[in-house]
Image (cartoon, grey):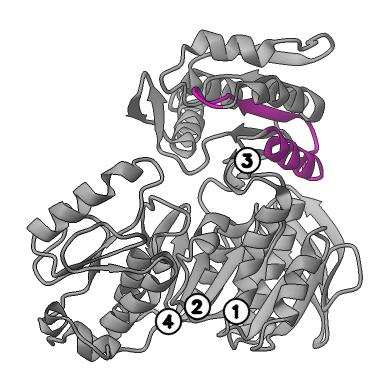
Amino acid sequence: MSITFQELYSVDQPAEWMTQTFQGFNLDSRKVTTGQIFIALTSFSQPEKTVEFAEKALNNGAIAVVSESDLGLKNNIVIPNVRHLMGQWEKQYLLATQPLNLARIIAVTGTNGKTTISRLIAELLMLQGKKCAVMGTTGNGILPHLEASSHTTLDALHLQNALHEYAQQGAEFAAIEASSHGLEQGRLNGCDIEIAAYSNLSRDHLDYHGTLEAYAEAKSRLFKFESLKVAIINIDDEHANIMIDTAKSNPAQPKILTYSTTQSADYEVQDIQYSLSGANFKLVTAQGTFDVNSPLLGHFNVENIVASLIAAEQAGFALADLIVVAPQLKGAPGRMQVLRDAERLFVVDYAHTPDALIQVLQTLKRHVSQNLWAVFGCGGDRDRGKRPLMTQAALDHADIALITSDNPRTENPEQIFADMKAGIQFENHTVHEIHDRREAIKFAVKNAKDGDIVVIAGKGHENYQEIDGVRHWFDDVVEVQSAIDAQHHHSDSAYPAQ
């Protein structure tokens, strides 16, 4: 279907180009095709190149350029807040040229838990027979078919295109991670977010937001969407009130639902029992008390599963039916991902900061019956100050620490190991140092005993290791499973066939 810019956006005094056939928007001057409008966002890294990119787009067939400031070019419209408008524009264009029913959107924000909660929501809805798209750090797509994602929250144009495509594929729901960057930059604008969940907030991205208060304010923007019907908030978090107050001031008057593992809330968790097979707990709600059997490890995964159960219930499903399928949940790859081997557990997790490593180790202490291992490294070309803190975290919270490489990138690995050991008192601790990550994993698999839990931290879902600026294929999950299989093969072959 052909349409003009004037028809779609009802302009009072149209310029000549507004009456030409319009083919949508593009953010990449190299990919602009005839009939498109190029949105020339001012580059954070190369602001001086904006005019050059716009000229290239016009040469490639763009009918006009929308920019944040005047570029002095023909058919240049200046709209200072274009970042916050372009999602809605793109959605309007897509629905005008290809009408369909878009997926109902459930969005999740918070420092930790976004990836797991959005993934669990998608799994719960899938187990109710519904197609649900998921968008975030570990991939975008309709479960179980996800493609790698460049950002936690895509730019507004790509996000709208993806949602349109998922609707074409039959997705009735979409569970989306809403990052603080994405919210502040308006990448989710144009999305009719129906249900929003908040997990927690801790120190992160202060290089971008400046202060913890500004970071919390960015997160709270999720609760300003006028399409919002339900706000789900973890009241155990110290910043919960900012989210609640924002939801209360929303003209849409969304229903506010709270959850907690420590205090009175709309959904209260009681009597948590941890084991090597997961966690069992009681969920006290207005509809009654339910026994929940979760296969996921860790206290924070109790919180994550509760948030996802509430979100799926608010999407229109009976809580009892959702709890029945909870034991089948898997969660996000590389987020407390469990590989079981008889009475031993190997846990692959993305924890790559001291705080995240402490959280993972502390929470697994509740599950372990023997020794808790920490296999970890530190990335190159990143914050050197956190390296000894990572080592101290492992010594303080694990029984056995195994120092190995992460992504050295372009840095000398010897420098990284030296930093990790700087000022550390190793006496009275069991510590191993194996620089080759594959060999370190093999060592842990070979030496872990029944009742042990081995955490392989730092890379999570990543399937590469970057050395000297070159990415080599490397997947912690695959390496652990390979080492387990090799160990079984070796022990089997030790006994000749009878």
Q: Which residue is mark 1?
A: 195
Return the disc, 2 or 1, that comes first in the chain's sequence.
Answer: 2
| Label 4 secondary element | loop
Report how far apart the C-alphas of labels 4 and 1 lie in the structure.
12 Å
Q: Which residue is mark 4?
A: 103
- Image coordinates of residue 496 in percent, x first then y, are 45, 22
Q: Quadrant of the C terminus?
A: top left
Q: Does 198 sit above or below residue 256?
A: above
| Label 2 secondary element | strand
Q: Amino acid at mark 3?
A: Ala
The tally of labels here is: 4
Report how far apart the C-alphas of labels 3 and 4 lie in the structure.
41 Å
- Image coordinates of residue 438 in percent, x first then y, are 47, 23
The disc at residue 105 is 2
| Residue count near mark 3 (Cα–Cα under 10 Å), binned few <14, some 14–19, many ≥20 | few
Residue depth check, mark 3 versus mark 4: number of the one nearer the observer: 4
Residue depth check, mark 3 versus mark 2: number of the one nearer the observer: 2
CB under 8 Å between discs 2 and 1? yes
CB under 8 Å between discs 3 and 4? no
Q: Which residues are magenta?
A: 354-382
CB under 8 Å between discs 2 and 4? yes
Return the disc, 4 or 1, that comes first in the chain's sequence.
Answer: 4
